[in-house]
Each structure stands twice: as C-alpha cells, then as structure tokens.
Image: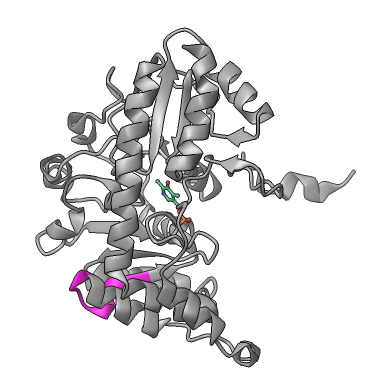
C-alpha cells in the first residue's frame, strides 16, 4: 500500500477556459481584450534587454507599484502586485481568512473563490443571488470571516453602484471586505477605490488581463490601506519573494501610464457590447445588463449546452457553465465588431 496517498491534499481544481492553438478560432471564451497592448508597451518590449533575464527581478516590483500608485493617486505602500489577480486573490484568502466563521461570497460568482477556500481549508457560505441574478446586500449583514464581492460580478456581468458596496462595508466593520474589480473599467459607474480613505478593512483587486490587454503577462494587484498591504507582503515573502518577472514589471509600468490608449479601446469594447446585446435580443436571446467586457445571454427556446456545442463545432468558442440556474446561459466575451458579426450570423439559425 502506498501510505503517502492518504497525505495528498485533495482538491477539486478550477477549470480555466480553453486556449486553442488553432489561430482560426474566434475566441470569445476567456474575456481577453481583442485589441493589442498600447503601442508604447510594444515598443518597450522590442527594446527590452533580455540579457538581464539572468538576474532575479526586483522583489518589490517598485517600478510597477510606483506607476500603479500614480495611476490611482495612492501611495506605493498601498499597492500589492501579483502574478495576475488570481495570485493576489489567493494571497488574500491565505492572509486574511483565518477565522472559524465562514467567508461569504455569492453562489454564482467567480468560481475560483470556492477553490481557494477549499485548498486553504477556509469555511465558506454562498448566499444565493436573487431571481434577477443580483447580489442581495442583506445576505452579508451577518457575522462572517470575510466577504468577497466581484463587481461587476462574473459570470453575470452585472455592476452594482457604490451605495451597494458601502452598505456591505458598513455592516462588516469586523471583517476584511474584498471587492474584485476585474471588469470595472467596462462598467458605467465608479470604483470602490473611492471608498478606501474611509474603510481600512477594504481591499480592491484589479487586473491588467482584461481592460489592459495583457492577459499573457499575468499582472494583477490589490489596493488597500497600508496595514492590509503589509500583511499581504509578509505572507508573500513567506511563500515566494520573486513573483513578478522582469518583463511584467517593465511592460506593466509602461501600460499603467498609457491611460488614453486604454480608455479608447475600452470605449470601443463597450460600444460593441451594446450593439451585440441588441442584435442578440433580436434573435431571441436575453442578455443580463452588462457592465463588463462580456455578455451573459440565454436563448428563450434552445439550451445553452446545445448552442455552446454547435458554436464550438463552427470554431466559435464561448464559455458555458454546467451549474444550477445558469446552465442555459452562454458567457460571450465581447470581441471586435467583425468577430461579433460572425457570431451573430451563426446564431441567426436559432431565431
Ligand atoms: C479574469 C478574472 C480574474 C483573474 O484575472 P487574472 O488574469 O488572474 O488577473 C479575477 N477575478 C475575476 C472576477 C475575473 O473575471
């Protein structure tokens, strides 16, 4: 008998979206940006001295944290950078959720939250979204070991205003409240960053994977008061001190200073989203109101599984979740206008 088998940490892993090698696939399945990084980023990449890769990177990634601090008008000591926001969120779960009380997050939200809670043995409860797929603030009024809210939520795409976030903060003075703003740049409303001066238990998590067109570099970060950031760094330096690699630090710092370019492509994605939502509705789909770079849509008559499979056959990849209440929905990343036209053309067969 292999005794060591009993000592393996058993977990049900997160399943990431497919990354097909076939370049002809219309890839609307992982919420990447259809537009390239800023020209300044590409130029810097060309001129980067790869000989320096023999050296470890700056463990503090100060060039990047300084640029992010300028971008948000906060101190560098209020920024915790990581290898994508997945790394940052994982460190947040490990650092702040050490209570016997359950951490709270919605039943339908980013499915990685429950995976981190499981792998770190953190108790959690998942209050149900209401019948319109919205988070009910009052479900988060009870005692807990922490709160995690994605805003806009994924995969529902729905954005809640600051009053909603502040309501949750006001009822959770004794917990760390995490607001995952992976999609906030596509929302028509303010960020919870505005609330940071008033709430020292708030952490806002951001990523360069979606609105900054840099999913391939893996850059994410948390913004919070200095006390929470210090706690995160203490844990990080107890796990892996050199997290961000040299190219990510260099190119991320440049991207943080190219706001105008990214505002431009974000406006394009939002315009395409609004047009695509109207077209889909004409074809018999219902789209939840989106504040993100994706649409969460279901057809009135044909099952989500069927449409997902037939799209895939046709080389159009979207995401489908085999979960209660949402298995008739497709999560469709907003691509270029041309990609969305190809999708909509295909979907005409269901109208
Ligand atoms: C995409 C996403 C992330 C992770 O992004 P990274 O690529 O790891 O930065 C985190 N939270 C939500 C809600 C997301 O959709």
Instruction: Tell me where residue 107 appears, x and y as whole percent.
Output: 39, 29
Residue 153 quadrant: top left
State whether residue 175 is above or below residue 142.
below
Instruction: Mark yes or no: residue 150 visible.
Output: no
Q: Which residue reaches farthest right? A: 1
> Is 14 in front, or is 217?
217
Q: Residue at x 54, y 15 (%)?
A: 349
State whether residue 42 is above or below residue 224.
below
Instruction: Tell me where residue 94 appears, x and y as whole percent.
Output: 44, 58
Q: Is residue 66 left or right of residue 201?
A: right
Q: Is residue 99 magenta?
A: no
Residue 337 quadrant: top left
Instruction: Specify the color scheme.
Output: one colour
Q: Does the magenta stretch include residue 75?
A: yes
> Is 323 in front, or is 73?
73
Q: Which residue is drawn at 90% across and 43% down?
A: 1
What range is drawn magenta here?
72-80
Number of residue marks: 0
Q: Which residue reaches farthest top? A: 301
> Is 254 in front, or is 93?
254
State whether residue 261 is above or below residue 305.
below
Instruction: Tell me where residue 34 appears, x and y as whole percent.
Output: 47, 51
Q: Residue at x 36, y 49 (%)?
A: 99
Q: Residue at x 18, y 35 (%)?
A: 141
Residue 311 quadrant: top right
Instruction: Mark yes or no: residue 319 visible.
Output: yes
Instruction: Tell me where residue 129 appears, x and y as whole percent.
Output: 31, 25
Q: Is residue 193 left or right of residue 180?
A: left
């Amino acid at each position: 008998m292999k005794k060591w088998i009993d000592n393996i940490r058993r977990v049900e892993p997160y399943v990431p979206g497919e990354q097909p090698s076939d370049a002809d696939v219309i890839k609307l399945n992982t919420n990447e940006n259809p537009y390239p990084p800023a020209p300044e980023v590409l130029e810097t990449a060309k001129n980067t001295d790869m000989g320096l890769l023999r050296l470890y990177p700056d463990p503090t990634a100060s060039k990047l944290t300084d640029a992010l601090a300028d971008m948000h008008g906060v101190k560098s000591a209020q920024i915790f950078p990581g290898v994508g926001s997945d790394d940052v969120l994982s460190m947040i779960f490990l650092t702040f959720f050490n209570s016997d009380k359950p951490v709270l997050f919605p039943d339908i939200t980013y499915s990685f939250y429950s995976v981190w809670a499981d792998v770190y043995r953190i108790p959690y409860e998942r209050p149900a979204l209401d019948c319109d797929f919205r988070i009910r603030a009052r479900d988060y009024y009870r005692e807990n070991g922490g709160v995690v809210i994605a805003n806009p939520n994924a995969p529902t795409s729905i954005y809640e205003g600051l009053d909603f976030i502040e309501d949750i903060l006001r009822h959770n003075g004794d917990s760390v409240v995490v607001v995952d703003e992976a999609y906030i740049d596509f929302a028509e409303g303010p960020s919870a960053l505005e609330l940071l001066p008033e709430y020292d238990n708030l952490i806002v998590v951001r990523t360069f994977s979606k609105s900054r067109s840099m999913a391939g570099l893996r850059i994410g970060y948390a913004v919070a008061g200095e006390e929470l950031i210090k706690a995160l760094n203490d844990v990080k330096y107890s796990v892996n001190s050199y997290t961000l690699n040299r190219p990510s630090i260099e190119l991320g710092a440049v991207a943080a200073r190219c706001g105008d370019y990214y505002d431009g492509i974000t406006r394009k994605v939002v315009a395409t989203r609004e047009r695509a939502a109207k077209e889909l509705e004409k074809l018999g789909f219902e789209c939840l109101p989106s504040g993100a770079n994706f649409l969460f849509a279901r057809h009135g008559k044909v099952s989500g599984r069927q449409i997902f499979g037939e799209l895939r056959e046709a080389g159009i990849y979207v995401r489908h979740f085999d979960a209660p209440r949402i298995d008739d929905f497709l999560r469709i990343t907003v691509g270029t206008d041309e990609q969305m036209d190809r999708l909509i053309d295909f979907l005409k067969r269901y109208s």
